[in-house]
Amino acid sequence: MDFKEVEKSKSFITIEIIEYVHNSVVLKTILKKSTGNVSLMSVDTGEGLTEKTSPFDTFAQVIDGHAELVINGISHSLKTGESIVIPAHAPNFIKPNGRFKMILTIIKSGYE
């Protein structure tokens, strides 16, 4: 997989650096370090993600549209500008519910 961070010290409009793709989920990593990473995700209408867990906390912020995240069996409805922290080791998935874009920030330090 070819990885390229966004150019540092140059401003950008976050919502514009990832596009919606018909019938797809798109993930774009904008910063990747050993202590964590920041990614953008776009999800088209009718698409979702299967249940997963992560050994790290994940900060999720919706930047366009509306998303439904299910964490530990509890549904959370988020709209543009709203955020949630997905706890480490918590089973979670995204329910299909219309298209949206979000920022995902994973913090890998502090678990020693």
Image (tube, grey):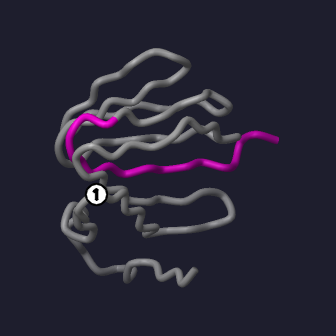
Q: Quadrant of residue 55?
A: top right
Residue lying farthest right? Answer: 112
Residue 63 versus residue 5 in the image, above or below: above
Residue 95 is left or right of residue 65, and the answer is right
Residue 92: x %, y % from top left: 53, 31
Residue 97: x %, y % from top left: 25, 34
Give the residue drawn at x 30%, y 52%: 43
Name the one closer to the observer, 35 or 28.
Answer: 28
**Location of the N terminus (image quadrant):** bottom right
**Location of the C terminus (image quadrant):** top right
108 falls in the magenta region: yes
Count the marks: how many?
1
19 falls in the magenta region: no
Give the residue drawn at x 47%, y 82%: 4
**SS for callout 1:** loop
First to last magenta residue range: 96-112
Give the residue drawn at x 27%, y 30%: 78
Residue 100 is left or right of residue 56, and the answer is left
Give the residue drawn at x 46%, y 41%: 59
Residue 40 versus residue 95 in the image, above or below: below
Q: Amino acid at mark 1?
A: Asn
Residue 15: x %, y % from top left: 21, 61
Residue 18 versus residue 74 in the image, above or below: below
Residue 8: x %, y % from top left: 39, 80
Q: Which residue is tagged 1?
A: 23
Residue lying farthest top? Answer: 74
